[in-house]
């Protein structure tokens, strides 16, 4: 029985080497044998191929390995021209692509998706000022956890700038503005300001004590207001 098993393994030739090597690597992985052991297993498997040719000429294992290696050699020779052609074409394309990199002209460019650019600009301005601005948002949630409104607050030195107020209910608007002013005072600000676009409601800010400090008339009924509350 053992002799038959050995003959079957020998008949497998290169396939037997692959199967035995795979099983050995699997066991080494299961028992955490380490990298050196795995390298040793692969090395022994590779050395077994030329070592098999030292067996007697009548050995079935030697014959199968020789046939497999012979087939692999002819396959490699057949594939080599195509592989070399692909390699040289790839190198040529990379070199040509590097030489044909478009030159970026200096000057002003339009950036439509500017969120990342604006954030980078804010960071650079803060770094140049020496004291980064505090930028936070206040959110109003209802009893069911739904967001009912929010406002953004930016504090830099004594000035607190409010923007982005949204809320449908007037009482929510008032609470958000009051909350933002309290937060601004806690952060050391003394003056509050807000720039209102033509479509934004003026009433909640007037009710919070903000007064008009400037206006820009854009024509066709569009007016941008700057409101200030000092002190906050």
Image: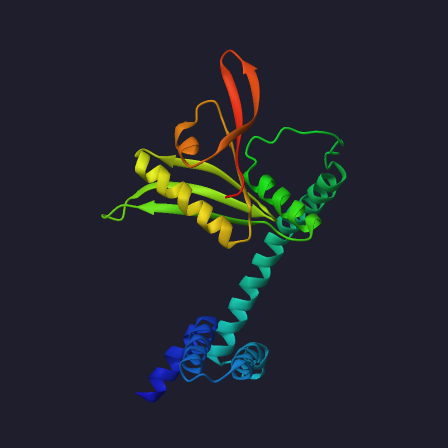
- Residue 45, given in percent of the width and then of the height, sits at 53, 78
18, above or below 200, in the image: below
Task: Tell me which colouring the rendered structure shows.
Answer: rainbow
In-image side of 216 versus 5 (left or right): right
- The part of the image, by quadrant, that contains residue 199 is top left
The outermost residue toward the bottom is: 2
In-image side of 25 versus 78 (left or right): left
Can residue 57 be seen in this snapshot?
no
Residue at 53%, 45% in the rendered image: 154
Can residue 18 be seen in this snapshot?
yes
What count of labels does the image hold? 0
- Residue 62, given in percent of the width and then of the height, sits at 51, 77
186, above or below 32, in the image: above
In-image side of 5 versus 180 (left or right): left
- Residue 209, given in percent of the width and then of the height, sits at 45, 36
63, above or below 36, in the image: above
In-image side of 23 versus 40 (left or right): left
Residue at 76%, 39% in the rendered image: 99
- Residue 114, given in percent of the width and then of the height, sits at 57, 36
């Amino acid at each position: 029985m053992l002799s038959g098993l050995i003959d079957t393994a020998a008949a497998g030739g290169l396939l037997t080497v692959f199967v035995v090597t795979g099983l050995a690597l699997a066991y080494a992985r299961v028992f955490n044998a380490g990298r050196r052991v795995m390298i040793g297993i692969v090395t022994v498997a590779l050395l077994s191929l030329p070592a098999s040719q030292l067996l007697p000429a009548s050995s079935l294992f030697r014959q199968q390995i020789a046939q497999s290696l012979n087939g692999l050699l002819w396959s490699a020779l057949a594939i080599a021209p195509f592989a070399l052609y692909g390699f040289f074409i790839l190198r040529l394309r990379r070199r040509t692509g590097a030489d044909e990199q478009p030159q970026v002209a200096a000057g002003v460019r339009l950036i439509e998706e500017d969120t990342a650019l604006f954030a980078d600009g804010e960071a650079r301005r803060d770094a140049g000022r020496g004291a980064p601005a505090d930028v936070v948002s206040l959110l109003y949630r209802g009893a069911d956890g739904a967001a009912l409104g929010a406002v953004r607050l930016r504090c830099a030195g004594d000035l607190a700038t409010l923007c982005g107020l949204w809320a449908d209910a007037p009482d929510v608007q008032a609470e958000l503005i009051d909350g933002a002013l309290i937060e601004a005072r806690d952060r050391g600000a003394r003056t509050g300001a807000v720039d209102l676009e033509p479509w934004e409601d003026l009433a909640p800010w007037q009710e919070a004590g903000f007064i008009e400090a400037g206006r820009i008339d854009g024509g066709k009924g569009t007016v941008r207001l700057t409101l200030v509350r000092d002190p906050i």
